[in-house]
Amino acid sequence: MARYETLLFDLDGTLINSVKLILDSYHHTLRVHGIPARTDDDWLRGVGTPLRVQFADWDDGSGKIEELVATYREYNLANHDAMVTLYDGIAEMLQEVRAAGYRTALVTSKNRQGALRGLNLTGLTPYLEKLVCVDDVVNPKPHPEPVLKALELLGTGPERAIFFGDSLHDMHSGRAAGVKTAAVLWGPFGRPHLEASSPDYWVSKPGEILSLVRA
């Protein structure tokens, strides 16, 4: 019997290369609203959490945060298709794991509209059985709720599930939900950044995933 039966995946920085679009969207939003710029590193620390978490410093009860989110999404969607690409080997990996009978789900802090835009653009939609997006949960990553929700939708338990992600938030969410965690190293974060989350596995390229879960 294979060690795992359920594979959960983050989206941005794990399946699709959208990091430059995300950073450009944040920088554009602050410029439009006359807010002093933040560095790429400032924004990257929160990548993997919802927009309202990233913009929390401007949540003063005046509705400003809704304006920031709206500006971000308008720019992001307008530039999405020209900037988002697949990481090398992702499509082939997902085809292989589905052909081998593994259950799959997406667990993302992006809203459903944005997640589907990326999946449809890159042709990944058929390979992910269920989607858990930020609008499907009360408590987003790093809380365990998104991972637990994905397992519930698939009708599987945590014992034979593994969550692949590129950020600390992914690793913390997976660990708190009781699944194994695998940190991917082709996204924006290197091993030194992710070591603090003590992932169960390190994955340097998508082609390693099928061998890992079969071992």
Image: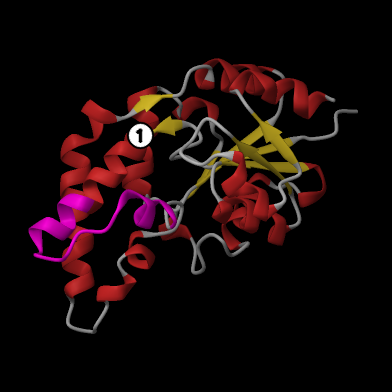
Nearer-the-camera pick, 99 or 205? 205
**Horizontal and vertical percent for residue 96?**
64, 17
| Image quarter of the C terminus | top right
Mark 1 residue crowding within 10 angstroms, few (<14) / some (14–19) / many (20+): many
Choose top left, top right, bottom left or bottom right for residue 103: top right
Residue 4, by quadrant, is: top right
Q: Is residue 108 left or right of residue 31?
A: right
- Residue 6: x and y in percent read 71, 38
- Badge 1 marks a residue whose secondary structure is helix
Left or right, 49 with respect to 28, comes to: right
Q: What residue range appears in magenta?
A: 27-45
Looking at the picture, does residue 54 appear above or below residue 1? below
- Look at the image and say whether residue 38 sits in the magenta stretch: yes
- Which residue: 30% across, 37% down? 20
Residue 146 in percent (x, y) is at 57, 57
Q: Position of residue 99 (x, y in %)?
A: 66, 17
Q: Is residue 165 magenta?
A: no
Residue at image location 63% in from the left, 62% down from the top: 144
**Where 177 falls versus 183 (above or below)?**
below
Q: Does residue 161 lie above or below 210 as drawn? A: below
